[in-house]
Each structure stands twice: as C-alpha cells, then as structure tokens.
Image (cartoon, rainbow, N blue to C red):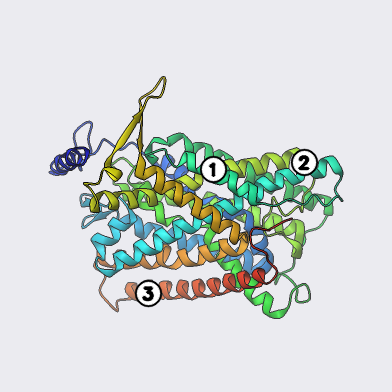
Amino acid sequence: MGGQNRAGFEVALDLPQQGGGSKCFDDDGRLKRTGTVWTASAHIITAVIGSGVLSLAWATAQLGWIAGPAVMFLFSFVTYYTSALLATCYRSGDPVTGKRNYTYMDAVRSNLGGAKVKLCGLVQYLNLFGVAIGYTIAASISMMAIGRSNCFHKKGDDSPCHSSNTPYMIAFGVIEIVLSQIPDFDQLWWLSIVAAVMSFTYSTIGLALGIAKVAENRKFGGSLTGITIGTVTQTQKIWRSFQALGDMAFAYSYSIILIEIQDTIKSPPSEFKTMKKATLVSVAVTTLFYMLCGCMGYAAFGDMAPGNLLTGFGFFKPYWLIDIANAAIVIHLIGAYQVFCQPLFAFIEKHAAKRFGDSQFIAKEIEIPVPGSRPYKLNVFRLIWRTIFVILTTVISMLLPFFNDVVGLLGALGFWPLTVYFPVEMYIVQMKIPKWSTKWLCLQILSGACLIITIAAAAGSIAGVVLDLKSYKPFGTNY
C-alpha cells in the first residue's frame, strides 16, 4: 500500500507549478526552503575541509615553496569558477524561474541527457564509494594514533608501541552500520554543525603545532623546489609531484553535493546568486586555511613532512592536544561518511523501489517503538543493503590502507569529470554559448588543461599504490 500511496502523493506535489509559491510552500510544492548564504557556506566548508587537509603539508613538500602554494591557489580558483557555472544550472532554462534540479544527476539529465547521465552517475557514485573507503582509512589511522600516543606517554618516546589498524577499522565500520540506518539525511541538521566544529578543531591544532615547531626550530624548513633529489630518486620525485596534485584536488572536491546544498536555499534573491556568494565565502575561507596548514606543516618539517600531519608522529608532545585533534578527526569522519554515503543509499533504494516495487522485502517497514519519540521504521532491505555496503568499504580499506595514494587517486578521478567537465558542458548548453566563440574556446581550454592534470595525478597515485604494494601484507598493516 505504501508504494501506491507515495506515488499518489508525488503526483499531487507536481501540480502547483504555476508561478510563485505560497507562504508555506515553494514554487515546486515542497516546503519553503530556509537556507541562507551562511548556512550554505557552512555546508560547503563542512564538505570541503575534511581529511584532505591533513595531506596538504606532504603535498606542499613534494612541490616546494613556489609551486605548492601556486597549485593550491590554482585549484581554488578553478573550483570557485566551475562551482559558479554549476550554480547557474540549478534551474533548467531560466536561472530564476526555470524547473529546479534537485541533484547533480538531475542537472546533467536536464541539460545534457543521454549517455552522459549514465557516465555522470557512474563517476559520481564510484567517487562516493571511494570517499567512504578513504574516510575509513583516515579514521582508523587517527584512532590508532590515539592508542599509540597514549602508549608513548606511558612507556616513553623510544618504545616501539606497535599496533594494527584492523581492529580500529572494524570499530569504525560498526559505528557506521548503526548510523547508516538513520533514514534521511535532512534530519541530520546538527551533524553538519558538529562536523564543521570538529574540522576546525583538528585543522587549527595541526596549524598551531606547525607554528610551535617552526618557533622551536627558529627557521622555516623546505626549499623553493620541494623535496630534494637524494632524499628520493628523480622518478619518485616526478610521481610524487603528480600525486601531490591529486591530494590537492581531493582537498577541494565538493561539487558533487553543490546542487543538493543549493536546493536548501530560500529565494528571492535567486538561488544561484546566493550560491555564488556562498561559494566565494567558503572557497576563500578554505583556501586561507589550506595555505596556512599546508605551508606551516611544510615549514615545520621540510622534506620530512608526514603524509598525514597529525598521525605521522612528527609531533609527540603535548599528548593530550594530539589526542584531542585525532578524536576530532574521528568524530568528523564518522559524520562525513554519512554525508557522502546517504545520496548513494538513497539512489540505490529509489531504484530498487522502482524496479521491485511489489516485493514485500523492499517495501515493508516494521515499526519499532522508541520511548519518548516517534516509532522508528525499520526497513529490512535498507538494513541489509546498507550493512553490506559498510562491510564492503571496511574490508577494502583493510586491504588497501594507503592514505595518501587513495586520497590522491580519488581526488584525481573525481576532479575533472565532476568539478570541471560536466559543469562546463552544462553551462554551455544552459547559456546557449555558440561553438568556436571565444567564451566556448576558453571553457574548452580550461577543461582540457584540467583533464591533463587529472591524468597526471591519477598516474602518480597508481604508481604510489604499486610501490606500497611491494612491501605490503594484507590485513597486516602495523605501525
């Protein structure tokens, strides 16, 4: 019955499309949106400042004092520019009154259509799957770092304190299995705030420790051209520089969820104007932050900058501060995992409901009474599918626990198609830009240049994974 009922409800919602919304509803019949520049900026900053920030000192060390900050600035500019293009495509046709697109895929479908929709879906959902793996690795490394730091504290800095990250990954997986049963992402408004606070906490601690280390050394480490040949071989330097590009691209990847964030913004003024402001605010804040974290980490450690700033044990003391930072990373990643996986869950469940709508297994919901609040609706299919998904990401993380390479590869694979190619193509269609005009050529040159960067970064990361695999035993990563 639920399925038929819902279908009727959706039809009813599609009717009131004539002109502006009423007091309680927007022009598409959904409840009035309430988002502002500030809520949108907070969402973006939460999505962007993630574990990517921890690999920036390492990435800067590969490129040096000139290219490092320059590349970071370049990525921030490209991200801002293409996000502004993407924001214009939130409504099809007219950017003020056109039909709304609720997700990135909807925007691609209404502007480009055909095979490109399938391609976009594939890249987007693979990327989300990859992010889940990346976050599992990062969280387990931080949990392990807390354990090791306490061990150093008890037994002294020279003791070996070996530990394996497998049990921590399993713990993270169990937590995510429980949280992934929360049906709807919109009900998690507080999660974004907690995550934003946490990411600022650990990034600021990383920054402060970097500054303290520089003060202690009384000099800035590093060189203009990055890590010296001798510390690494010539070929390694090239691969690592490419991988650093991927790490930096990953640090900025949020265009996947841009349209979903824009869908929370109230109008007037039209959503795309608000979104452009929000993008500018958040990219500016993020870039400033990244520059500080990446550069201070590099200044503190020079060529020896660790792949993950807070767990590479460049810092030993004060123990409690590093523990707080790592705990903040874990809490943030627990939330961020859900933020990135919920769209994927929703997508699969929607398709299953469409295809096997009559099946009891998929549609049936069991009500479980929860004292003091509404009964929780347990859906068997959701329980089983989401649990399998989390178990799968956890197992893959145990098999490939290389933080930097995985981050670089994800950044590379998601950067060109999702941040550059699709927004550029959609904007050309939306704004009806004629082929071979100056603007068309400039956009294509931008897209081509980013494609080359993506290929280089992917190659560097794959080379990194291959090198890591040579000295590696599955499920046995110990530190």
* Disc 3 versus disc 2: nearer the observer: 2
Label disc, if present, on residue 150 of the rendered structure: 2
Residue in the foreground of this view, choosing between 110 and 26: 110
The numbered dot on residue 303 is none
Kindly check if marks 3 and 2 are in contact, taking CB atoms under 8 A apart as contact.
Answer: no
Q: Nearer the viewer, residue 455 or 273?
A: 455
Pointer 3 residue: 444
Q: Where in the figure is residue 52, as x and y percent of width and height?
A: 57, 55
Q: Give amino acid for label 1.
A: Val
How far apart are the alpha carbons under marks 3 and 2?
53 Å
Q: Is residue 223 above or below residue 203?
A: below
Badge 3 or badge 2: first in the primary sequence: 2
Res 199 → quadrant: top right
Q: Earlier in the sequence, mark 3 or mark 1?
A: 1
Density class for disc 3 (Cα within 10 Å; few <14, some 14-19, many ≥20) is some
- Camera sees residue 431: no
The amino acid type, in three-letter code, at marker 3 is Gln
Residue 60: percent from left, percent from top:
65, 63
Q: Is residue 397 left or right of residue 359?
A: right
Q: Secondary structure at mark 2?
A: helix
Secondary structure at badge 1 equals helix
Q: How many marks?
A: 3
Residue 268 position within the rendered picture, expressed as x and y whole percent measured from the top left: 27, 41
